Image (cartoon, helix red, strand yellow):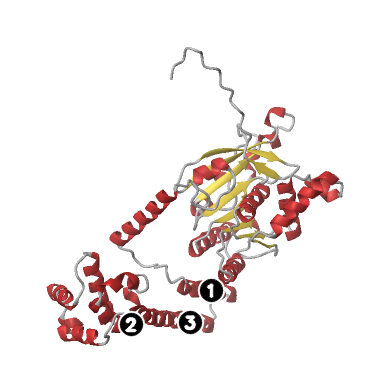
Amino acid sequence: MAVLGALLIDKDVIDGIIEVLQPKHFYSDVHRRIYEAILELYQRHMPVDVVTLTAELKKTDRLEELGGQKYLADLMEKVSTSAHTQAYANIVREKALMRELIRVSTTIVEKTQDGAEPVDKIIDFAEQQILQVAQTNTDHGFSSADSLAAQTLERMEKLFSQRSPLTGVPSGFLKLDGMTGGFQKSDLIILAARPSMGKTALALNVAYHACVEKKVPTAVFSMEMDKHSIMQRMICSAARANIGAVRKGLLSRSVWPQLTRVTQTVSESPLFIDDTPGLNILDIRNRTRKLMTQLKNEGKELGLVIIDYLQLIRGAGRTESRQQEVSEISRLLKDLARSLKIPVIALAQLNRRTEDKGRTDNKPMLSDLRDSGSIEQDADVVAMIHRDEYYKREDPTVKNQATLIVAKHRNGEVGVVDLAFFSEYTKFENPAVKAIEEEPLPESTVF
């Protein structure tokens, strides 16, 4: 009542209140509908006071059922000044969140007492529901076209003012970043390849660029390699140190200063590695949320999640087939990206059909994704690595050449990204750009 009364006294406070309160935050249906009427007047750029509000409610036959003109006058009597309206609005919002927490908690208790679902599924449900309450700025209900259009235009204006082709987390590969604008929030990116093509190497190159060079907090789940191997690969790749020589202890002394420098740089980066083997999809979701909360408490924001690799993730429960299990994993990974608003890169294996003798070439296609067509369906971006050098080892013309085939891009172009790959460093790089020598202009040329 105090909030509504203050809005009728001073319409200038409405701007600040709109950011805090939505109609659904009012407990009383009468107050919710009065607040909606005030917002309608405000959005039509009409004066907001007891006279205009009375006329508006009378015109739509809502005045009497909302208490009549006397009730509107009673609202104004609740406050003598609009100075504390923000504080009043915060109280209303906090009580609304308390009620939502009570509702969610009751549902969790009912699920727990019922015991019809496995405990890990109930825990995942509980964390997801609590997180949704915590993300109070997100409205998951219907959005009207007028409010949505205005918000979209505002976002486009912001992007235009920034005048930057990169709007997401950059990969460090120029053509790929040009096609995608960087890895976007809420996107599921599938990076697929046959074994030994370098998908882990490419993922770690992306992680290094994001967390070391751009200081984007990055989480890496590695179910194939242990954390020390991951760190060793990342450091050697950045320092251009031969990974084979490192493992044998035969590294040249001249490389050590660079290794030491890179190690120090990586140690200062916001990189987090989890190498727990045999994680199921719910474990990954729970641990990601926990890390996100930890970073938020430190004033940071998780920017990228990388999972190596999808086929090693276990499902949440019993399923009839592996295909059904992978479908569930794919769906929950996409849900993770959307609910946490972060890009998730999941590595995936391609099936053996790329190596069939009947195929004219070995370049992978979307249909080569293993186990489930739902991976292709759920992904926003699907990129597949191809290296001719792997199949034509005696051909010097394809040495160090690699291509990243962007076969699906939900919100942009598809195509081929040329890369250079150095297996001794497990490092992908942008291809060298050959300098073009310009011919001298004839002396008679006039500008």
Q: Which mark is residue 379?
A: none
Of circles 2 and 1, the one toward us is 2
Residue in the image at 71% along x and 59% along y: 267
Secondary element type, mark 2: loop
- All told, the count of numbered labels is 3
Q: Position of residue 97 (x, y in %)?
A: 42, 79
| Mark 2 in CB contact with mark 1 (< 8 angstroms) | no
Q: Residues within 10 Å of mark 2 (few under 14, many from 20)?
A: some
Residue 295 in view of the camera = yes
Q: Nearer the viewer, residue 34 or 103?
A: 34
Q: Earlier in the sequence, mark 3 or mark 2?
A: 2
Residue in the image at 43% along x and 82% along y: 98
Q: Earlier in the sequence, mark 1 or mark 3?
A: 3
Q: CA distance from mark 3 to mark 2?
A: 18 Å
Q: Position of residue 31 (x, y in %)?
A: 27, 81
Q: Position of residue 95 (x, y in %)?
A: 40, 83
Q: Amino acid at mark 3?
A: Ser
Residue in the image at 73% along x and 33% along y: 393
Q: Earlier in the sequence, mark 2 or mark 1?
A: 2
Q: Quadrant of the N terminus?
A: bottom left
Q: Nearer the viewer, residue 216 or 305?
A: 216
**Circle 2 sits on which residue?**
27
Q: Which mark is residue 127?
A: 1
Residue in the image at 74% along x and 52% along y: 261
Q: Amino acid at mark 1?
A: Glu
Q: CA distance from mark 2 to mark 1?
A: 25 Å
Q: Residues within 10 Å of mark 3 (few under 14, many from 20)?
A: some
Q: CA distance from mark 1 to mark 3?
A: 11 Å
**Circle 3 sits on which residue?**
105
Residue 394, image quadrant: top right
| Mark 3 in CB contact with mark 2 (< 8 angstroms) | no
Of circles 3 and 2, the one toward us is 2
